[in-house]
Structure formats: C-alpha cells, structure tokens
Image: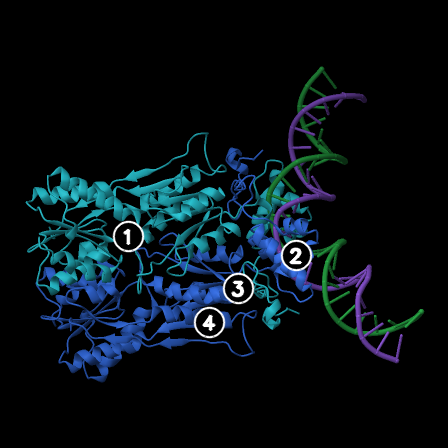
Chain colours: A blue, B cyan, C purple, D green
Amino acid sequence: MAYNVNLLPAKIVPKPWPERQPVLAKVGGEKSLASSIHDLARHLNISIGTVSRALNGRADVNADTRQRVLAAAKQLNYAPNQSGRSLRQGATHSIAFMLQPHPGDQQYGEPFFIPFLIGLQGRLAESGLDLTVVMGAPGDYQQERLRRVVETRRADAVVLAWTRREDERIDYLLEAGFPFATLGRSRSGGKAYPSLDLDFEKAGADAVDRLVARGHRRIAAIRPSLNLNFGYLFLDGYRKALKRHGIEVDPALIADGFINEAGGYQVTPRVMLAKNRPTAIIFNNDAMALGGCKALAEMGIRPGHDIAVTVIVDTPLCRYFSPALTAFRPSLEPMGWRLAEMLLASLPAFAGPEGTRILREVWPLELIVRDSD
Amino acid sequence: MAYNVNLLPAKIVPKPWPERQPVLAKVGGEKSLASSIHDLARHLNISIGTVSRALNGRADVNADTRQRVLAAAKQLNYAPNQSGRSLRQGATHSIAFMLQPHPGDQQYGEPFFIPFLIGLQGRLAESGLDLTVVMGAPGDYQQERLRRVVETRRADAVVLAWTRREDERIDYLLEAGFPFATLGRSRSGGKAYPSLDLDFEKAGADAVDRLVARGHRRIAAIRPSLNLNFGYLFLDGYRKALKRHGIEVDPALIADGFINEAGGYQVTPRVMLAKNRPTAIIFNNDAMALGGCKALAEMGIRPGHDIAVTVIVDTPLCRYFSPALTAFRPSLEPMGWRLAEMLLASLPAFAGPEGTRILREVWPLELIVRDSD
DNA sequence: CGTTTTTCCGTAAACGTTTACGATGACACA
DNA sequence: TGTGTCATCGTAAACGTTTACGGAAAAACG
C-alpha cells in the first residue's frame, strides 16, 4: 500500500532532500528484462561468487567454468544491474555533462556542443564509461543541479561547459573534492584541474590583425553578455591587437548582448550608430552574427561589400550564409576526445603511471577565409 | 589490490557484457561528500528505519522526531545515495532521452531538441524525476545503446525522437515491456504507446495550398533521406494537396538529402535543373533550407523574388535569414512538457485514476508568413 | 482499573553486486 | 607418507536504502 505523501496534513509534510516520490513499479512484469547473477548461478549450479568472478575476468576461475558462465550469460540475456554494481563499488561508471540553457535562449539552443559531445562520449566509451547529459532548467545556473548530481552520487565525475569568469561551480567542485573537467577556462579555483579551451584571445587578435592589414581601423566587437569567460578572452585579444597597431579602443564600438540571434540583432545597430561608424565587425558567436547581419541588412548594409564581418566560432551556418562568413573554426570533436582523456588521466582508477595529469590545454582556432570580409 | 583485466593471457580474457572496468576510487576521501542514513541515526541516537521513515514522509513517525531528523539532515548535508535507493526500489527515478547524431551530421547537430528538452525536463522535475540524455555514437542507430540502458536498468523509461517509418527501437521496447514515449510517429509496433507528433502532413498540404493560391503550379519538395517518418508525412500532404488542385506530381521536383546544410546544398540544384523548373520550393528542414538557399544564391536565384521558399520547421535561423523565411512553427517547449505528461500517465506509479493513458497526439504547426514566398 | 486501540519506533530482511577469506582437492616434492 | 603449493570455488559480509513486522508505551474507552 503506497503511502501518499500528498495526503499528509500540511504541517507535517516533510521537505526532505530531495522530495521523495512514489516508487515506480518494476517494469517488465513476469518476463523480467534481464536475469540476475543469481539466475545464472542457479542455472549452472554454482555459486554467485564464481559467476561474478567469471564475468569480471578474475584469474581464479577455471577456464571451462568461465566459458559456461559466459555462454549462460548470453543465453539468459544477463546484464548486470547498474544500481547493484554502483552501490557495491561506490562508482557509477558514468560521467555527467551539465547542459544549461541560457536565460536568453528563448527558442533554441547551441548546436555547438553536439560534435564536442560525440568526441567526449567516444573516448569515455572506450574506457567503459557512459556519458549522460543532465539538463537543468534555464536560468538557475546549474548550481542546484550540480549539487544534486554530486551529492546523490549519480556520476563519478562531471564535465562543465560555458565556464564563467568567476565560476561558483568550479569552486564548489574543488572544495567537495569531486573530479571534473571543464570546457573553457575560468579564474576560479586555486587548485589545478583539467581544462581545455580555445584560444579566443589569439583569435580576437588575429581577426583584428587581418582587418587592419586590409585597411580597417574602426573595428567593432560584439560579444555575449553574462560573464562567459570566452567573451573576456576575445575582448582582451581584440584590445591588445588594436593597441599594438596604435589604434585607440573606442568603447562605443564594443557591445554585449544575449548569446543568440536576438542578441546580435538587438545590439548591432548600437555600434553602427556610433559617431565613428565601424567598417568592420567581429562577432564572438555565430548566432549573434546571424542576428547582426539581419540588422545590417535592414540598414541596407551588405556584409562583404559595405562592411567586413568576421565570426569567431565557425559553424555550418557561417559557411552556408550568403555571403559566406569568414570565421575561426574549432575542432570540436577532437576537443571532446581530448577533454575526456584529460579527465580520465585525473581519475586514479584510469590514470596511467604517476604524474600524468594533463592540465590547461588551449587549442588554436583555424581561420577560414570566406566572402564576408 | 585491483586485478587488472588487461594482464590476462589473451585466450582467457573474457568479453562479458558489458566490458568490466577498473573500479573508480571513491571520491572525496576523508571528508565524505554527504552523509548516509546511518550517520543521521547515530547522530540522533535513533534507528535508521525511523530516519528513513521521517525523510520519506511516512505517517508513523513523531512530528518532533521528524523535525529533528530533517534538521540533522540539513546540518550533516545528507543526500540519499541514489544507487542504494534504486537498488532497493527497483527504480532509478530518471528518464532517459536518446540523442543520436545522424551519420550525415559531420559537424553540428540539431538545435531543435533543446527547447523540447527544457519542457520535458521541467515536467519530469515536477514529479521528482531526472532527465538524462544518453548520447550514442553517430551511425549506430541507437539500438545497442538502447538495449544497454534498458537492460542495465539505468532509467525507468525512455523517450525516443527521430522516429523512423519502421522503427526497431519501438519494436524492441514494446516487446521488452519497457515504458517509453516517442516524439514522432512510426508505423512500428502493434500495441499502443504514448506518442506526440507534429502534423507534417497538414503543414505540407497547407504550404502547397498557399503557394497554389499565389499562382504557383510547379512546386518542389525537399526532404530528409534516411527513413525519418516526418519526411514521409510531409510528402504525403504535399502530394495530396497537389492532386486536390489537379496538379500532377512531378517526381523530378522531389528530392531527398542528408538532413543538414550540406544535404540541402547538394540536392537543391537537382530540382532546379528539372525540365519543369519549379517556381517554389518547400524545404522540410531549416538546415536543408539554408544549404538550399546557398545553392540558389550561387545560381543567381533570389528567394522571395525569383522563387518562393517555404520551410516546414521554423527556427530562429528562418527568422533572421535574409530574406526572412516563411515557415511553419512548432511549439517545442509545450510539446516536451506534454510528452512528459503522456509518459507519466503511462507509468503506474504516476498515473492518476485508471484509464487516463494519453496516446497519439498530433499537434499543429503555425504558419509564420515572412518574406521568402 | 482492565481492555483495546493508537502511536511510535526498533529489528531485520531484501535489492544485486563485488570481494576478502577460507575451504577443498589436486598435485608436486621431499 | 607427509607437507606445501596451487587452482578453484563457496561463504558471507558489505554497499545504502526501504519497508514489513512486531513490540512497547501511551492513549482511549468501557
């Protein structure tokens, strides 16, 4: 008889952590989905210990017995119960990726992560780990979800993205001693942790260099608001390069907006109406570039003709847009692969010889010249 | 002393299911991340049974005791071990969404799902369920991953997307008796299951109706290959509407391509070079439309001027493209919410009164008229 | 005051694994 | 034959929960 929490008088309704819920009925009914180690043992008339050892490749089991166990496992469609394994071993064999929609993301999210996740999952799978993406509600900045994943031990490690300038998630994980790796840098955290980032600073500088070489001197920069760290890095490179060329940085040519099409659309007219009207714009994001180009089109300004447009992170959109947008391209899938490797190297159970931890890599972006600048 | 599987002589290396891996060290070391129910019991000098009952809101526990337990839980930073709970209850309290990159998706994936997932996760969270997205490698069509999730009981139910005409995943889940719901219809599966889909058939017909009303008679249709079901539905609507208007269906005006920018780019010239050159194109996907418009631009054909372009599934891309693309818009977040509701209604533990299962809803797409037709 | 009911809590089993430990033979060797 | 080694296996505990059951004390009732 399931007890219904909701029927409790209001004042004694507990708010434990987390809210407990009705128990799901066991699925599958009679024909259980998969057999347990006990079924195998009974079927073969041996002990469960031996079955487990056989399945786990331990040495102290007869070769013949092992074969029989494996055959029976296949025949009876055995699959180890993950909860049982996790409970006993204190490890879930799965890595969590925190995917957090941005507050400004009204409609659609970043396609950016998919190839990254493909690489990540590919490498993790090679080590027998599952990758599970845990979604948060938009706007709560993951802190709560992260705590929950960590404290209920749903994953053995986490991978963070969209790192911020100061990132409380990183502080939390460091303090908790929970293994993690980040896509992107941050200024948070005294201790070292594996992180992989793109060289937005150099890309910003390279973009400026190229534009200056082509005669531009009034160059606008449009980057995401929030305090996403790559926006700062990009702007640093932009500023330094301008100074190197003896060009004064004009604050009116720098704007922040939501990291989506609407943000770019909204913010671009602002820099175009500056006293010193720019002859070039660098967008720090493909979606913002799309929105920005829309705004330009409405002002009768044609990218590649009347203004030079450069995008920092390339996507298929940049290639298929008309005119095709000059952009800096990351190699996302290898990055996912690599970050998995870095994370694994930081986990005692997977690390090779001592001292092989890999920390703080910064990868270059490749300039793809197209028609917009 | 951990036994290293890799040191086994090759011939007795077992290939159990799944490949077993080294055990991860318990994280956190001394300062354990969270305390167990035993810690609470010891701290309060009561039994673990009482602690559990207090936390779970059972009635047979003194109000005062409950308060003390809850206070201690907060103080000691208690969080229930998920593996323990799952093992005991036979339920994981988490729902899996299978995300499968398409073979053609070389670089980037579908942003389509994010708002859907936001809605899905929002509703599930209200019932205390976690949503975890499980990634597969591109190309293997999920069957293996799905089996693994189901058989190792990593989730209590799954949500499928990208349903195909005949979908072996659905057949498998039905036969296994595992709860699931699908975003999209399929012809598979004799038995009923919760599914939510968009009315691609009507959208296809409406698109034709509108174009015919504006004087077009040679209308091309470009849809994804593979046998994604919505491609068929769209084409059905397209065909029926043409016939209704007494227009013969010209196979040369219909083309399939990979469901991304490259696919649209590759396939669009094919229909444009038909003997009966079309005056309008309906794209079944926004990315394909982007690629297609690129091809058109290279042929000197301007959407909205020289040709009418309509897109079946609207995204921000359609809105911010120049010219803005007329498109049919889904309401993805409510769909996610609704599908979660349908799934929950099919789970005994969450269903309300008997007979409230919700099956097979088909939602309309809203026509957004812009500048491209 | 005796009896019955109610309230509250402790006990212990169970979920499916893994693994430390010990037991049993088989075999080798002196 | 006695002793030691090795291969192989069974036993049982443990991981952290939930929950059926029963018991003790308190409350209610006659």
Q: Judge if badges 2 and 3 mark residues of a common chain.
A: yes
Tag 4: residue type? Answer: Glu
Asked where in the image residue A249 lies, by quadrant, the reply is bottom left
Q: Say what secondary structure mark 2 lies in.
A: helix
Q: Judge if badges 3 and 4 mark residues of a common chain.
A: yes
Tag 2: residue type? Answer: Val
Q: Identify which residue, A22 or A201, lies in the foreground.
A: A22
Q: Judge if badges 2 and 4 mark residues of a common chain.
A: yes
Residue B83, given in percent of the width and then of the height, sits at 57, 52
Q: CA distance from mark 2 to mark 3?
A: 37 Å
Q: Please give the label number shown on residue A341.
A: 4
Q: CA distance from mark 2 to mark 4?
A: 32 Å
Which of the two discs, 1 and 3, labels the residue nearer the N terminus?
1
Instruction: Find out whether the residues at labels 1 and 4 contact each other: C-beta distance under 8 Å.
Output: no
Determine which residue is flagged by label 1: A106
Determine which residue is flagged by label 3: A176
Q: Please give the label number shown on residue A51.
A: 2
Tag 3: residue type? Answer: Ala
**On screen, residue B261 above or below B330:** below
Q: Is residue A256 left or right of residue A323?
A: right
Q: CA distance from mark 1 to mark 3?
A: 33 Å
Which of the two discs, 1 and 4, labels the residue nearer the N terminus?
1
Q: CA distance from mark 1 to mark 4?
A: 34 Å
Characterize the local packing of mark 4: few (<14), some (14-19) or many (20 or more) Cα atoms within 10 angstroms.
Answer: many
Which of the two discs, 2 and 3, labels the residue nearer the N terminus?
2
Asked where in the image residue D13 lies, by quadrant, the reply is bottom right
Q: Residue at x 15, y 65 (%)?
A: A322
